[in-house]
Image (tube, rainbow, N blue to C red):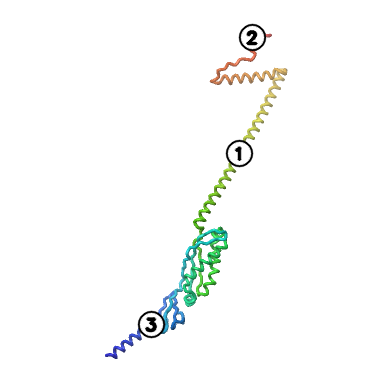
Amino acid sequence: MDGMIVLLALLVLAVITLLKGVRVVPQGSKWVVQRLGKYDRTLPPGLNFTIPYIETVAYKVTTKDIVLDIPSQEVITRDNAVIIANAVAYINILFPEKAVYGIESYEIAIQTLVQTTLRSIVGEMDLDDALSSRDHIKAKLKTAISDDIADWGITLKTVEIQDINPSQTMQRAMEEQAAAERQRRATVTRADGEKQAAILEAEGRLEASRRDAEAKVVLAEATKEAIEKVTEGIQDKELPAVYLLGERYVEAIKDMAKSQNSKLMVLPADIPAAVRGLMNISK
């Protein structure tokens, strides 16, 4: 009876030992095996066998692309402007044994490396260049990081700049600057408008004066021509001028008479002469 128990126990132990030596690695993973505490080999996906109690699976590493979110940080540009920048890195582990033995924590190491490299790249650029050169920053960042993490058996698939914006203080300063620039442009535009209006007004006055002068010249020519024609008809030197003045005098009297508020009675300056003229009385 005791022999059967021992035999059964040995059988169970053998089954457990056999099962401990069978390793099924899932797709998308690689397992790092240590023999007596020392790295021995890396198990690929599929069915694998290990020596029980001597070999152990120390690390299980994914071979899928890993997305690392790089925390936001303040970065100072070459012209002493403060901007907030963050990124995201896509990595893939090619050699798991280098990733687990070459660095204590490759994820933290890569995040720190991206942050420091990003600060170094942006620190060599002016604010305007940093805000408008994402592709340039991305290319330099990828080149700088790829060589460093290759020693850890990791490849950098790509790195993207998520956000790169001025800090709140810089945004307020930029908004104030933009507002001042818009005010300056508005002032210049208003001044140009007033200048053009003044020029147009002056040109209008000049044109009106020119037209008025031309009208006076035309009127004077007409008056001259009228006097010449009257003189030719009457053949007298003084009488034509008297005739024209009398004509205008009569027209002025008519205009005054048409006014509703007119309360004046206009009499000839030489009343006796006028009366004699009306009565055909000679001196």
Element marked by disc 3: helix
Residue 234 horizontal/vertical position (percent): 71, 17
Q: Which residue lies under the disc numbered 2?
A: 279
Q: Is residue 232 left or right of residue 83?
A: right
Depth check, mark 3 against mark 2: the one in front is 3
Q: Which mark is residue 198?
A: 1
Residue 158 horizontal/vertical position (percent): 51, 68
**Amino acid at pointer 2:** Met
Task: Tell me which label, 1 or 3, sits earlier in the chain.
Answer: 3
- Residue 94 visible (yes or no): no
Residue 114 horizontal/vertical position (percent): 51, 67
**Amino acid at pointer 3:** Lys
Query: How many numbered discs?
Result: 3
Structural crowding at the residue carrying mark 3, measured as other residues with C-alpha within 10 Å and reported as few (<14), some (14–19) or many (≥20): some
Q: Is residue 45 left or right of residue 265?
A: left
User: Is the C terminus in the top left, top right, bottom left or bottom right quadrant?
Assistant: top right
Depth check, mark 2 against mark 1: the one in front is 1
Q: Is the residue 163 above or below the residue 18 in the image?
A: above
Q: Which mark is residue 20?
A: 3
Element marked by disc 2: helix
